[in-house]
Structures are given as structure tokens and as C-alpha cells.
Image (cartoon, grey):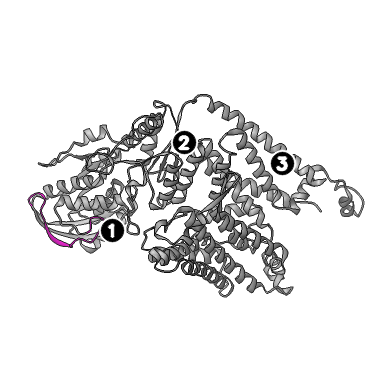
Amino acid sequence: MRSGVAVFTATAAAFSLAACNRGSSTDTGGGGEAAVGVVLITKDSTNPFFVAMQEGAKADAAKNNVKLTVASGKQEGDDQGQITAIEDAIARGDKGILITPMSTGVNAAIKKAREAGLYVIALDTPPDPANTVDITFATDNREAGKLDGQWAAATLDGKPAVIALLDLFNDKIVSVDYNRDQGFLEGMGIPLNDPKKNGDEAKTGKYTGGKGGDYTIVCNEAGNGAEDGGRTAMEKCLAKNPNINLVYTINEPTAVGANAALKAAGTTATIVSVDGGCAGVAQVKNGVIGATAQQYPLKMATMGMEAIAKVARGGEKPTPDPGLDFKNTGVALVTDKPVEGVESIDSAKGAEICWGK
Amino acid sequence: MATTTTSSAAAEFARRQHSPMERVQHQLHGKPWLSPLFLLLGTFVAFFIATPTFLTANSMGILLQQTAVVAALAVGQTLVILTAGIDLSVGAIMVLSMMVMATLARDDGMPGVLALLIGVVLATGAGLLNGLLVTRINLPPFIVTLGTLSIFTAIALLYSGGSSIQADRLPDILNLLGEGFSIGGVRLTWGIVVVGVMYAVVGFVLSQTAWGRYVYAVGDDVESARLSGVPSKRVLLAVYTLAGLTYGLAAWVLIGRAGAATPNAAPDANLASITAVVIGGTSLFGGRGRLIGTLIGALIVQTFAFGLSQLGVNQQWRVLATGVLVIVAVAIDQWIRKVRS
């Protein structure tokens, strides 16, 4: 008897809740009859790079009659968050997935999605192995690093290079990390060992880029891609050798942190970086960053979405660029001190096509 | 009514007719898992009406798979919270256990069964360590598990070298819980079955055995439990150890689910397990709650997340919804506790 009352009250509450939802669903469901369901899954939802991607995709969705859902991991490293988002997309009947894969930990879920008939495009970060997804749209990160290295070598003009390498992680291995770092060394003309491993090259020797000269690698420190991490990493490097005159940074927030450490130590160095976000380009303009390789997240997102919409409507599938296992979305070196033999654009031009705020 | 002039106001009060609301309150007080169950049913009805993709066999299978890992962790968390403790090291123990299992067995370096056993034993040992620190050194569980959270996380990273291990490099037994079967189109994994068995066994022990009563008694008031002959410290030690064992099993479920062992696989496992327990009607102050409530709590959180996602709602909204759920659940709990006898 008593439980009867309880059941009644709860059921009534449930139905009133349901009624509310019905109202809202009718509102949203009306517009998109033939819309193609696409989900964009980024690593997190706070990194300006991913925010730019999301905004680019949202702006492009209506144009392609795409019903876009945006999801992400809670933070860098949240495999489970991405796996959940992939499963949600399968259940929702989406036609395709745009994903910046967190790690190999999400490969199995991607495989499941492809088996369910979804077209999967990796953005920015190619998965390992690359054929886990249908295709990757990304920056050629090795090329980005190489541009930095070539520019740095030419800028040194034969002087000895005392180098700090501020990488992304030291507790896990990701392709963006080693591709940029190794690309930079390659551009400097420093002999590499394992091209997929950071920190295994000879610590001293000759670089052959530019006029060539002696080099010393002081450190490989992880800055986790953020200002505070970049500062701490640079402090550690400066403690080892205060004469550092060239700093490679995985991205611009790390570069800003490194600059703060250099300033606090009362010294200066040439800083190179990768990303080309609007904040980073501004740092090039004000002289903090010597050169940065600009990538194009908006282009990745919009090109990816257009490709999925096309495939879903029976169109042709995109193919990788010749010689690469991904579709290159382009990279340009942004610097106000151009050097001979390295193509670049100035900070004014970089600011016109930069991403983020 | 309380202003009556009779001297036996209390007795009169007891004889008074209960209002329907009070009867509901009584029912809920007796069965702390009832209100979460109604909330879950309500959620189902709401999403069923709101989106066609929600209540399909395919979706239900996915929903259960998504709930499995947190539900597994929440078994141990419930035990600890019932003793008025809290375990912040659940995710760390699970990940440590998972990385040890996977690393030992990688490319069949060790027979899968043995690696699995070592991983589970290690998790049990980690739980035992938590228990020893709580009972022998008398440190608060919050502090102990805050410390071991960092310790176990660091060991997992150091041991695994930070790299993840793919399913195809692992023996079948470690991938087994990702495999499964279909019932009426609902795809269930063996992981879901294992979690179901965990709930049945631990739920039985808690509600039907003397030891289960001891757990509640210790959680209610550890000192009076001790004075009435309950071996409080031994019960506490057993609770933390058993919790460790369940995290080891959760590690096995997680490998199957993710198809890989990743050192930073589930960053919010601790809070998710606590959320499931709290929404499931178990009191954070100990001594009150049921394991079935925890299972319902885990399902509620996941159902909200899944349902909103099926609607195409931005995921920040589901994080927000989870927050609201926690507060509503505890508010209902507080209301139920004010029951008049």
C-alpha cells in the first residue's frame, strides 16, 4: 500500500519530466531532416587549438547540412572520454567521426565505429598506426619543425648553438612530439638517431644548416604544452647551462613560459615554436618568438567535415597527399626576420590567417 | 499540534495519522535505493520520449558497457564509504593493476592467467596497504588514499614507461571481458557479467552475513561497535583489502573495454565512483546505504550522459547535470533522514 503511493509519485514525476523533454526535442528536430550526423571529438575543450577547431566546424556545419555534435576528453590523456564519445556517435547513427585521437588507447573504439559503417577522419594527430582511421587531415609536423630548424640555423649565421629542447611530454610518446622535435634537429642539420625518439642524439657535434657550426644540446625537458610547464622546463635547462642561445618549443604557450624564465634569469635566446595561434603570432610581432610554424586547425575541421558529408551522400572518398600517409593541411613559417632559402610570411600576414583569440 | 497541553505530547504525536508525504518518506527511509531507482526510471522514460535512438537494443548494450568500469570501482568505494571512509586511490589502483597485468603479459612474456592473477593480487595488496595505514597508524582514510593515489599513479607510470599497450599484443584472457554475446539484440560483454556477479556476491555478503552487519556497525560508530564486540579494526582492514580486490577486477574489465592498457586511462575514476555511491543513496557519513543503490547511481549518471549525447547536447551539459544530480540526491537523502517515527 505504502509503496504504491511512492511508485505513483515517482512515476508522475518521471512523466512530467518526460513531457518537458518532448517539447524541446520537437523544437530541435524540426529543421534537419536529411542532415548528416557528424561528431567532432577533440582531446579537450579548453586548448585554443581545439576550440578553434570546434568553432570552425560549427560555422561550417549548416553550410554542409551537417548535424554536428561536439565532444572531447575531459583533459589531455582522457581515453575513456573519447571512447565514450565514439560509442555515443555509433548509437546516435552518425555518419562520420572527426577525431584528434588521444592515444593508441582509443584505437579499438575507432575500429568498432568503422565496423559500424562510420567514416572516421583523424584531425591534427595521425593515429598509430595511421590506417586505424580512414584518413588523417593534419599539419606535417616534421615539416613544421624542419622550417623552425632551418630558420634557426640560418639565423645563427655560423655561431655555436647552445640548444634547449622543450618537448611536450616525457612520460609518454606521441607523434606530434617527436615529429616536431626531430624535424627541428633535422632542419638544423643535426644527425638523428631513432627518428621516433626524442633525446637520443649526440649531445655535442656539428650542425650543417645555414653556415654550419658547433652545437650543444643542453636538455630535453617536458613542458606539457603550457605556460607554467614551459617556464619550469626552461628553468631546469638554464640551471644546467646558463648560456643557452636557442630554444625549441613544442608550442607557443611553452615558448611564452620559456621566455619568462629567460627574462627572470636576465638572459635572452632565440625561441622557435609551432602553432601559429593568434596569441603566438602576436609574440612573433613583439619579438618574444623568433619564428613559429603556423598550422591551420579550422581548415582541418572544415575540410574533414566536408569530406564526411560528401562520403555520406555517396561521393568520393578523400585520398592522402602523394608521399605522405595523410592529407596535408599546410604549414607556413611566420617570422619578421626572414632568412634566405627559407620561405616565410611576416607576422602581419600570419595574423590575418591565425586561429584562436 | 506540539502546543497541546497534555503532558504526554510525544506519545500523542506518535499516534497521529501520517500524511501521504510522510508515508513516502517512511518507505524511502527503509529502502534508501528506492529514490534513485525512481530517478533512473524517470530518466529512462524522459529520454525514451525525447530521442528515438535512446531505447534501442544497440543503445542499451552500449550504455551498460559504458557503465561497467565505474560500476565495478564503485563496489569497493561503497564498502569504504559505508565504513565512513573515502577512497581516493580507486583509479590509481585500477590503473596500476592494469599496467602490471598488461606489461607482464605483453607478447606472451608471461601466461595471461598468471599475469591477470598477479595484477589482481597486487590490487588487493594495494587495498591492504590502505587498510593497514588506516587501522595501524590511525590516519584518516582521506589522507591515506590521497597519498597512495599519488604513489600508485607514479608507480604505474614508472613501471609501464608511460606507453600504452594494444590489445593485439595481449593474450586472449586479458581481452576476454571486452568480448561478449547478444541477448535480444542487446550486446553484453563478459565484463558486464563480471560486474553483475560482483554486485550479487558483495551485495549478498553485505546484507545477509554477520560480517556485513559489522561493516554497517563500524560505519555507524566505530567506537560503540568495538565496545559491543565487533572486531572493528579487522573489519576495516578487510573492507579496504576487499575493495582493492574489486579494483583489480575493474582493471580487467577496463582492458577489455578500452582494447588497450593505457597509463592514464581514466582520469576521473575516483570522483565518478564517489558520485555513483552518493547518488545511489549511501551516506558519506557511513553506516547507511545499499550496494544496489550504487549500481543504480552509476546507471543514472551514465544514462544522463548517454541520453544527452544522443540528443546531440554539448557534453558540458551532462557534466552540469551530474553536478545537479549529486546535490538533488543528497538533498533527498537529508529529507528522508528527517523521518518521524
**Residue named by callout 1:** A221
Q: Earlier in the sequence, mark 1 or mark 3?
A: 3
Q: Secondary structure at mark 1?
A: strand
From the viewer's perspective, is the residue at label 2 or at label 3 nearer?
A: 2
The answer to whether B117 is drawn above or below residue B183 in the figure is below
Q: Quadrant of residue A136?
A: top left
Q: Amino acid at mark 2?
A: Asp
Mark 3 chain: A
Q: Residue furthest right?
A: B6
Left or right relative to A292: residue B258: right
Rendered-image quadrant of the N terminus of chain B: top right
Magenta stretch secondary structure, dominant: loop
Mark 2 and mark 3 residues within 8 Å of each other at the beta carbon: no
Q: Which residue sits at x=48%, y=56%?
A: B256
Location of residue A208 in the rendering, given as x and y in whole percent from the top left corner: 10, 53
Mark 2 and mark 1 residues within 8 Å of each other at the beta carbon: no
User: Is label 2 on the same chain as label 3?
Assistant: yes
Left or right relative to A320: residue B153: right
**Residue named by callout 3:** A10
Q: Earlier in the sequence, mark 2 or mark 1?
A: 2
**Magenta-drawn stretch contains A196:** yes
Part of the protein shown in magenta: A194-211
User: Is label 1 on the same chain as label 3?
Assistant: yes
User: Is label 2 on the same chain as label 1?
Assistant: yes
The image's mark for residue A94 is 2
Q: Quadrant of residue A295?
A: top left
From the viewer's perspective, is the residue at label 1 or at label 3 nearer?
A: 3
Residue nearest the viewer, comparing B332 with A148? A148
The image's mark for residue A52 is none
Q: Amino acid at mark 3?
A: Ala
**Magenta-drawn stretch contains B35:** no
The Cα–Cα distance between marks 2 and 3, rounded to whole angstroms, is 34 Å
